[in-house]
Image: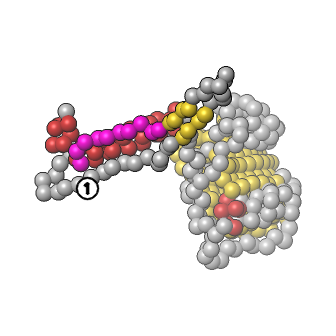
Amino acid sequence: MFDFFKRLFTIPGVSFPGIRPKMPDLDVEMKTPRFMGWSADLRMYWPKLNIPGGSLRVGVVAAIIGVAIAGGTYFFAAKGVTQAPTYPQAAVYDVGQNYRLDEKQVRVGTRPEQGTQTLNLVIGGARIDALNFNTISVGKATGLAEAVKVSGTSSNTLQCDTVVLDGIEAPSLWLGNSSIHELEIIDNAADGLSIGATLSAVSDITVGSTRGTISVPNAANSTYDRIIVDTSSADSICNTLTLKDIKAFGAYTGYAIHLEHLDVGKLTIKNSIIGSGSGIDTPDFTVATSTNVTTTTLTNNLERAITIK
């Protein structure tokens, strides 16, 4: 057997220096209590291990290291050690903190203590180029307030050049507590449509240079229970926010699509189907009177019986 290992780890023309592993000296002397004038002395030493042959030593040491690595890998796997979630996996992502640390892109998030399938972006204070959510299914039958929520506070808003909702299918949609320079609502169908925006002089927000902005990768072709964009801790800026082909189902204590505390240059809602089946006398598509706008374009929007399942 030794000849086999020697041939296996022998390279013609190459010789390995002798390897003599040595443990730290262990020479411990212990004295036992004296009993009736008699006691025994105890000594402890490391057991001696001698592996003959330079090539064999290399092979055995390599095998020991390999077994140690494999054992460690198995141990961590068995203990359930998992990597941190990466965007856009369901998790909480502190975009504002990433921005303050001058990071170029959002990558790693944290899982909440109680596991959910929520994609939660905490963006307070960040300057972002684009937030794009495309071809995503959200919601669950019951137990949620919203499926998609973009919000802040009366003093901390999300300030965007352009916001687009395109191809939304959801039981309800609500927009309020916002200031929009140009509001465009075109080619939508709703189980009740209520546009109560208030005419007001709203500044046209335009994002100039995107230098220094943080990049948030696109979230696409995914499923979540909810999507939350939260700017409640501080004002945030984005060049564009796009919600395209978002499909939501379920019964909500609030609104399936909930948008508020936005300051926007131009906001467009188009090609969307909104309805819970409650009837057109109970609007499911609502632009509240708390939404201030300078100009509004309403084109080809239909009210008809719709139930999103």
Q: Kindly indicate the quadrant of the structure image that contains residue 247.
A: top right
Relative to 61, say whether 37 is above or below: above
Q: What element carries label 1?
A: loop
- The residue lying at 75 percent from left, 36 percent from top is 144
Considering every residue shown, the one lying at the far top of the view is: 36
Q: Where is residue 190 in the image (x, y as percent from the top left)?
A: 71, 43
Name the colouring of the figure: secondary structure
Q: Number of callouts in the render?
A: 1
Q: Position of residue 24 (x, y in %)?
A: 47, 48
- In the image, is residue 53 part of the stretch drawn in magenta? yes
The residue lying toward the viewer, choosing from 35 and 131, is 35
Characterize the local packing of mark 1: few (<14), some (14-19) or many (20 or more) Cα atoms within 10 angstroms.
few
Residue 188 in view, yes or no: no
Q: Nearer the viewer, residue 173 or 25?
A: 25
- How far across and how far down the image is residue 185, in percent? 70, 56
Q: Main secondary structure of the magenta part?
A: loop
Q: Residue drawn 62% across and 59% down?
A: 131
Q: Which of 30 and 40 is in front in this view?
A: 40
Which residue is drawn at the image coordinates 19% and 33% (left, top)? 1
Residue placed furthest toward the left: 12
Q: Quadrant of residue 67?
A: top left
Residue at left 24%, top 48%? 54
Disc 1 target residue: 17
The quadrant in which the C terminus is found is top right
Which range is magenta? 45-54
Residue 1 sits inside the magenta stretch = no
Considering depth in this image, is 294 or 233 the residue closer to the camera? 233
